[in-house]
Structure formats: C-alpha cells, structure tokens
Amino acid sequence: MELLFVTILGAGIAAIMRYALPARHSYGLFLLPAVGAIVASIVWVALVWVGLTFNGGWIWLASLGLSSAASLTVGLLVPRRRHEADTQLLTRLSGSKT
C-alpha cells in the first residue's frame, strides 16, 4: 500500500513542479508526473529490496527526493533540447536562410 502512496506523492510533487518551471509549453502535461511516479516507485522498490523498512523516514525521503530531482532535471533539460532541435529543423527546412 505504501508503494501506491509514494507513487502518487511522487507524481503530485512533479505535477506541482511542472507549473513552477519555465518553458512548460515545450513538453506535455503528463511528462513530469510520469517521471516522478516512475522514479519514486523504482527507488522505493530498490530500497525495500536493500532492506529498508517502509515505516522509516529515510525510504520516504530518498524516494521523494530522487523523484523530485529527476523531475526537475527533465523539466529543465527537455525545453533546452527541444529549442535546439526546433532551431536545427527550421534551419534545415528553410534552406539555411534564417
């Protein structure tokens, strides 16, 4: 049951983060929540396999912290790469006249 909670919290934090970051028009609505949910659940399961218990604070902190860090990284890198790719495509399609 705790895996469900941490997955929902990871997605929720990333959804809030989506509206706090600039250039959110460069990626879809569910990209950051999906990244947050996936990373939170993978980290949670890995830490349970290592031996941490679900009622400890470290497993929650690590899962939600890494989920937030991954969502922040994706939210900052995707717009930059998207802008670069769009610029290259425009240059190629316009015959290098820009």
Image: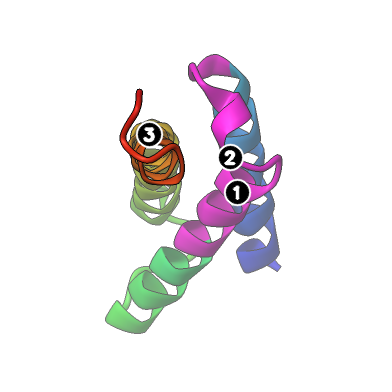
Report helix, strand or loop for mark 1: helix
Q: Position of residue 84 (x, y in %)?
A: 33, 36
Q: Residue at x 45, y 66 (%)?
A: 44
- Residue highlighted by disc 1: 31
Q: Which residue matches tag 2?
A: 27
User: Residue shown at 62%/57% (left/top)?
Assistant: 7
What residue appears at the point 45 percent right and 75 percent down from the top-left corner? 45
User: Residue 16, percent across and down?
Assistant: 63, 26
- Which residues are the magenta region? 20-40
Is 73 colored magenta in this rendering?
no
The quarter in which the N terminus is drawn is bottom right
Quadrant that contains the C terminus: top left
Read off the residue under disc 3.
87
Distance between mark 3 and mark 2 Cα atoms: 16 Å
Judge by depth and name the residue closer to the eye, 10 or 90. Answer: 90
Q: Is residue 29 visible?
A: yes
Single out the mark in the foreground, 3 or 1: 3
Amino acid at the residue labelled 1: Leu
